[in-house]
């Protein structure tokens, strides 16, 4: 039975005995869709999408009495949120070991409840009333996965279309479990690490099944029996998509696919196959795509493809093929794509293959050194040939003569050079070639004749070679060339008219060469992008002649030190200019005077100051500029930038990592309407920012102030909705910053949301510990108080500082009697106190102290009435002292104490009644002492503490003998309260058989005394 988020007008009374499926969904996302995606080899995706109300993700197995739900449901949802409506469920997903997004780590993600170790689940009826016994605790819930499917588990799901049981611990399946699913189209059993086999005739019970995912299973043998329905069966499986990848398959019986006449895609990648059977595809008459990549195959059977094979895609990458005879695949006459990349092929032998429909052939990343004969016959349709990443040194002149339809050729990452291969002869018949990649080879020179036959070429990549110069002209045959990449060569000079004949060239890349000087280029008028970055230019090149359409100019990472008058010429169409990472110290006022359409300008990582009035002249014409990056320069005063009346279209301004120091002024003093939306001021050494700094910038959306030196900052007078990023500053949580704890603040005549201030952590007095702001309260924001006892530092919540709230002393015991009455937190950590008789204030019988820290203060003795005036105390830390014993009534006055630390002392025992008046304690730390036993009175007090959450007992000298049975039995009953229980060990003098062992590892006999122990 199923439960969904839909409610009906009929009332149902459900009992645990008949409950078989829960459906849980948050009401806030009731209109969302659950989808199951199937990806085909060509990249197309088939999505099975269902409304959330038709999706279930909890199963209850009445035979094993186990309820399993995905972890995104809390306890209350599991026991309270469900209604009965099985006919609406179309998609069930119980994926319990799914990888965590982004981390890609497998982790239990299911919530399971078993009756054997927890109270029974409630039954629920219409209207929310509950029937039966209900447990309000979370005990009994644990992380677990499905281990089996009972035969009747899914019997009421006749409309179910998708069943996702991946990432579980299923061990054995019976086909009977699926016999009541006539509409099931998708079944996923992926990643069940203990499922070694599929049930016989599985698909015979699932007459509508189209998609089966059995990947990431320990199958070893291809599950052919799951698809065989017997000789007397009239049912033919309708399976179209079968994924058995990553399933450790090392054997495939012959005729495995005989009964899969509808199968279109088979994925057998990432297995251990060394051989294929003689007729691996026999019977799969509809198969169009086969992936056998990442196996251990070194050859294919002679009858690999059957007559009239429809196989269009064959992927065999990353196997162990050492040679390949393409002719052997001629029976695969419908092949459109063949991928044998990333093998160890060193030889292609045999005559040209007759594969008339083949469009894409990938032979990349093998060990080919020579190609001497054509790959396919004349009657071919080859469109893309990838020979990259081999060791090619020689290509025969006739190898590509019959590839007249080829449009893309990849020869990058080989060892070709102009002496070993005659490019003009190899390419002479490639009149339709549009993309040629010769990058990362060993060419030292190129000539006009090399590409004379490539009249359709549009993209030519020659990057990463050893070309040292480009001589006059690249040939009139390249008149259709759109993109030319010469980056990463050894160019020291370029003939001015070298690129002039390329009249349709759009993009030219000459970055990462050795160019020191560039004279006037005669560039094609069609050029849109020109990249000269990563060279050694000292002067900006004049590139304006004949390039009226140039939009992008990249001059970054050169050695340009200045821009003279009209340095960039008349580039009136330029939209993006990158001058970053140069040595610019000055810019002439007329440098940009003709860049009227410039939208993005990067000047980052230079040595510009721009602190005077010349700034106005430099940027005066850039009225369409939208992005300006001036980060990592030498600017100290940014006011001139904001006094301009021209940069009104600017949307983003980056001034990060300039030595600005402070902004004690309004950035828009003239209230000019600016469209600035994003202002970056990261790492500017800012110690002060005026509250009025951003007023008047009405379109502002984000201000980045990260990684500065701001210890305090005000609420900024800015337009509502501006986000201020402030993390990475040494923010102090002083009383001036207490507004961070509020949700909204009324100021400047508007309601300011403090969530607009991205402050993740700040340092809290007195110890200056870094704490998350979200964990703080207003009382944690402190300023130094004006009045304070000697040798102490006091802090107050208000700015006047007249009433200290926190007192932090490094003083003698006399100061303990002279504390201010308003003190809430008192610390003497690090003092030398020795004996402490009393703690209080002058003429005060009752103190306000709630937290007292005497840890690490050399205390060796405490008087019986030392805390008599501290009835409001909540936290007491006496750790790291020299205490050997405690007065019996030491804690009696502390009726509100919730946290007590006595760790790292020299206590050998605790007085019997020490904790009898402290039953409200939540945390007790007794670790790192010399304690040998817990008395009956102490354990009785521990049992009476209803709110107790943590008790630390490790690193003591516990006696594991019969007189210490109280300790043993309390530990057994309350082990969950003792986080350091592995360190609760038996003392060395407890006997050789138990010495050094954890107390909880012993049995009861160790703690029996006398006659009982002998029995």
Image (cartoon, grey):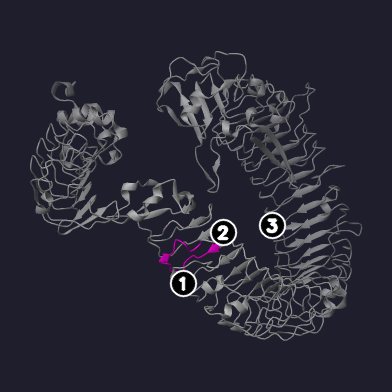
Q: Residues within 10 Å of mark 1 (few under 14, many from 20)?
A: some
Across and down, in percent, residue 420 comes to 77, 76
Residue closest to the eye, 835 or 986: 835
Circle 1 residue: 660
Across and down, in percent, residue 570 comes to 74, 80
Reply above or below: 692 against 125: below
Quarter of the figure that contains the N terminus: top right
Circle 2 residue: 700
Determine which of the numbered discs, if any, sits on residue 343 in the image: 3
Across and down, in percent, residue 729 comes to 41, 61
Main secondary structure of the magenta stretch: loop
Residue under the point 56% across and 56% down: 701
Give, as a single range, the part of the protein colored magenta: 679-694
Nearest to N terminus: mark 1 or mark 2: 1
Reply above or below: 34 against 3: below
Nearest to N terminus: mark 3 or mark 2: 3
Tell me whether circle 3 and circle 1 mark residues in contact (CB < 8 Å): no
Reply above or below: 46 against 125: below
| CA distance for labels 1 and 2 | 20 Å
Q: Quadrant of residue 450?
A: bottom right
Q: Residues within 10 Å of mark 2 (few under 14, many from 20)?
A: many
Q: What secondary structure is found at the residue carrying circle 1? A: loop
| CA distance for labels 3 and 1 | 57 Å
């Amino acid at each position: 039975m199923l439960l969904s988020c839909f409610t009906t007008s009929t009332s149902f009374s459900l009992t645990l005995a008949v409950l078989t499926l829960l459906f849980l969904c948050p009401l806030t996302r009731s209109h969302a869709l659950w989808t199951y995606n199937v990806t085909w080899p060509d990249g197309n995706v088939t999505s099975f999408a269902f409304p959330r109300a038709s999706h279930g993700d909890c199963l209850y197995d009445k035979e094993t009495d186990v309820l399993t739900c995905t972890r995104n449901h809390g306890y209350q949802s599991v026991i309270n949120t469900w209604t009965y409506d099985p006919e609406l469920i179309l998609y069930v997903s119980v994926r319990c070991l799914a990888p965590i997004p982004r981390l890609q780590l497998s982790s239990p993600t299911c919530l399971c409840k078993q009756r054997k170790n927890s109270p029974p689940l409630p039954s629920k009826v219409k209207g929310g009333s509950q029937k039966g016994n209900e447990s309000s605790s979370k005990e009994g819930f644990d992380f677990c996965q499905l281990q089996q499917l009972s035969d009747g588990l899914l019997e009421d799901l006749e409309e179910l279309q998708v069943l996702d049981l991946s990432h579980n611990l299923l061990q054995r399946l019976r086909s009977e479990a699926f016999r009541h699913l006539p509409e099931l189209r998708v079944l996923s059993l992926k990643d069940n690490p203990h499922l070694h086999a599929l049930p016989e005739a599985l698909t015979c019970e699932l007459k509508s099944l189209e998609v089966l995912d059995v990947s990431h299973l320990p199958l070893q043998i291809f599950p052919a029996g799951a698809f065989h329905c017997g000789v007397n069966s009239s049912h033919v499986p309708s399976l179209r998509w079968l994924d058995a990848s990553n399933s450790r398959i090392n054997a495939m019986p012959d005729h495995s696919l005989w009964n899969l006449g509808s199968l279109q895609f088979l994925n057998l990648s990432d297995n251990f196959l060394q051989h294929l059977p003689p007729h691996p595809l026999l019977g799969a008459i509809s198969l169009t795509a086969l992936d056998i990549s990442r196996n251990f195959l070194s050859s294919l059977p002679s009858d690999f493809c059957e007559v009239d094979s429809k196989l269009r895609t064959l992927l065999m990458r990353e196997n162990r093929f050492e040679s390949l005879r393409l002719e052997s695949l001629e029976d695969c006459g419908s092949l459109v794509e063949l991928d044998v990349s990333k093998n160890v092929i060193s030889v292609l032998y045999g005559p040209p293959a007759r594969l008339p429909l083949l469009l894409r052939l990938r032979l990349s990343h093998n060990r080919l050194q020579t190609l001497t004969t054509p790959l396919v016959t004349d009657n071919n349709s080859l469109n893309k040939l990838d020979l990259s990443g081999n060791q090619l040194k020689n290509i025969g002149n006739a190898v590509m003569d019959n590839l007249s339809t080829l449009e893309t050729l990849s020869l990058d990452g080989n060892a070709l050079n102009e002496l070993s291969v005659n490019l003009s002869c190899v390419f002479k018949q490639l009149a339709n070639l549009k993309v040629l990649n010769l990058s990362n080879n060993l060419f030292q020179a190129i000539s006009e004749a090399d590409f004379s036959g490539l009249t359709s070429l549009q993209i030519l990549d020659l990057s990463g070679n050893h070309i040292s110069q480009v001589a006059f002209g690249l040939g009139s045959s390249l008149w259709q060339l759109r993109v030319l990449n010469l980056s990463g060569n050894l160019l020291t000079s370029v003939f001015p008219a070298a690129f002039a004949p390329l009249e349709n060239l759009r993009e030219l890349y000459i970055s990462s060469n050795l160019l020191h000087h560039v004279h006037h280029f005669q560039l094609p008028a069609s050029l849109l992008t020109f990249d000269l970055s990563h060279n050694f230019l000292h002067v900006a090149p004049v590139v304006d002649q004949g390039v009226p359409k140039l939009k992008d100019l990249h001059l970054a990472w050169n050695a340009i030190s200045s821009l003279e008058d009209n340095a960039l010429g008349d580039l009136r169409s330029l939209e993006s200019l990158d001058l970053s990472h140069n040595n610019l110290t000055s810019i002439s006022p007329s440098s940009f005077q003709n860049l009227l359409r410039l939208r993005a300008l990067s000047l980052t990582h230079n040595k510009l100051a721009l602190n005077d009035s010349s700034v106005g002249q430099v940027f005066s014409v850039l009225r369409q500029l939208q992005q300006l990056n001036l980060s990592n320069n030498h600017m100290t005063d940014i006011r001139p930038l904001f006094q301009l009346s021209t940069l009104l279209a600017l949307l983003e301004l980056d001034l990060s990592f300039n030595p600005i120091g402070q902004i004690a002024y309004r950035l828009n003093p003239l209230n000019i309407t600016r469209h600035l939306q994003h202002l970056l001021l990261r790492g500017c050494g800012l110690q002060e920012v005026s509250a009025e700094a951003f007023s008047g910038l009405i379109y502002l959306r984000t201000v980045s102030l990260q990684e500065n030196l701001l210890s305090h900052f005000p609420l900024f007078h800015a337009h509502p909705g501006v986000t201020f990023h402030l993390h990475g500053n040494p923010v102090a949580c002083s009383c001036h910053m207490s507004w961070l704890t509020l949700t909204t603040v009324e100021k400047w005549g508007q309601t300011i949301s403090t969530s607009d201030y991205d402050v993740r952590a700040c340092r809290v007095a007195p110890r200056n510990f870094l704490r998350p702001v979200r964990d703080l309260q207003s009382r944690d924001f402190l300023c130094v108080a004006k009045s304070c006892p000697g040798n102490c530092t006091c802090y107050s919540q208000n700015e006047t500082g007249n009433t200290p709230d926190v007192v932090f002393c490094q003083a003698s015991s006399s100061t303990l009697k002279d504390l201010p009455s308003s003190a809430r937190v008192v610390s003497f950590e690090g003092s030398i106190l020795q004996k402490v008789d009393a703690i209080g204030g002058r003429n005060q019988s009752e103190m306000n102290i709630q937290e007292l820290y005497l840890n690490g203060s050399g205390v060796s003795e405490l008087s019986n009435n030392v805390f008599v005036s501290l009835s409001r105390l909540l936290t007491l830390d006496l750790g790291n002292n020299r205490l050997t014993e405690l007065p019996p009534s030491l804690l009696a006055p502390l009726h509100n104490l919730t946290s007590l630390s006595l760790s790292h002392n020299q206590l050998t025992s605790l007085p019997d009644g020490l904790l009898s008046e402290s039953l409200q304690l939540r945390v007790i730390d007794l670790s790192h002492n010399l304690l040998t036993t817990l008395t009956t009175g102490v354990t009785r007090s521990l049992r009476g503490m209803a709110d107790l959450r943590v008790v630390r007992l490790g690193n003591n000298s516990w006696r594991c003998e019969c007189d210490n049975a109280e300790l043993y039995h309390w530990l057994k009953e309350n082990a969950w309260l003792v986080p350091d229980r592995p360190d609760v060990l038996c003392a060395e003098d407890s006997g050789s058989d138990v010495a050094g062992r954890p107390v909880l590892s012993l049995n009861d006999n160790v703690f029996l005394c006398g006659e009982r122990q002998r029995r």
